[in-house]
Image: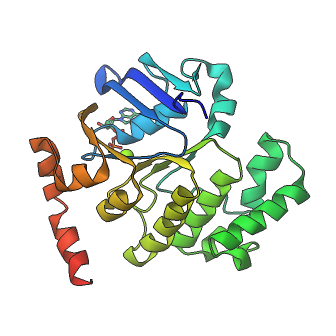
Amino acid sequence: MSNQPLLEVRNISKGFDGTGVLDGVSLTIREGEVLVIVGPSGCGKSTLLRCINGLEQIDSGEILLRGETISGKKKNLVSVRQRVGMVFQSYDLFPHLDVMGNLLLGPTKALKRPKAEVEQEALIALRRVGLEEKAHALPRTLSGGQKQRVALVRALLMKPEMLLLDEITAALDPEMVREVLNVVLDLARDGMTMAIVTHEMRFAEAVADRVIFLENGKIIEEGPPAEFFHHPKTQRARQFLDTFVYETAKNGEQG
Ligand code: ADP
Ligand code: MG
């Protein structure tokens, strides 16, 4: 295997209407690695993920996928979004299509793959996330946790080289968070390369190979999860993690 990172973000900056949001962010993600990005609301986490898969254009810097520049090239966007899958907080499934219809759309239209073949893969993937019996259900009949698992399957069926997950459990009722995060843990064990933005700190610690703490569009701290969560180097990271003390105490009580 080559030593080249799968994804390389080099000194990118991005602003909206003259207001800086990302300010010289650099990071790399190696094949099979899980990078967790944490930081206060508004620090630029979503913008960073959106720049990586071309939903936003960067102002300066460069983004490379397997050594190939993918930023600043509009004609590459379709291929970049296939190679770098993304799942958001809102599931945005098409309401008039059943689960299978939603899953078939990308692979058959964008990748022009045969329907029967994708259908087989989709059923296997649905079984894996515990939703095989929902193949012909309409999105509105599913719970939030079920919809988000469908959204993950939909992203995976595009056979991306890596996945970006932007607070995918933030809109879910607490009892549904775990079923979605378990799917993500399963993907990580399978070697899926991921960049994950989350406020679920225990999950973050369990899934991460490396953690980045972002504030005001800059990386303030970076390190292995055991170090970042238990011995943060910066005062800013300590303060940020202190805001999760209540959550930890609460979870601790439940064992
Ligand atoms: P986070 O995901 O860390 O909460 P975001 O990346 O969503 O932060 O936003 C960072 C900052 O950029 C915020 O101040 C937000 O208001 C601003 N921002 C994000 N997207 C846009 C946009 N499309 N137009 C203008 N401002 C934006
Ligand atoms: Mg966000």
| Nearer to the camera, 224 or 135 | 224
**Residue 122 in picture, x, y percent from top left:** 76, 62
Identify the residue at horizontal 60%, vertical 59% (top origin). 151
Rendered residue at 72%/63% (across/down)? 96
Instruction: Tell whether 26 sits left or right of 64.
Output: left
- Residue at position x 50%, y 47% from top? 194
Specify whether residue 182 is in view: yes
Q: Tell me residue 242's x, y (percent).
A: 13, 57
Task: Report the residue at 66% width, 75% height from top.
Answer: 131
Looking at the picture, tell me which residue is in the foreground, 148 or 84. 84
The answer to which quarter of the image holds residue 61 is top left
Colour basis: rainbow
Relative horizontal placement of residue 50, taking residue 99 as reference (left or right)? left
Ligand 1: quadrant of the figure: top left
Q: Position of residue 27 (x, y in %)?
A: 39, 31
Looking at the image, the residue that sits furthest to the left is 235
- The quarter of the displayed image where residue 26 is located: top left
171 is higher (above) or lower (below) than 164: below
Label count reads 0
Quarter occupied by the N terminus = top right
Rendered image quadrant of residue 39 = top left
Q: Quadrant of the C terminus?
A: bottom left
In the image, is 7 to the left or to the right of 238? right
Given the current orientation, which residue lies at the most extreme bottom position? 254
Left or right of 94, for residue 178 = left
Q: Position of residue 24 (x, y in %)?
A: 32, 22
Res. 98 in view: no
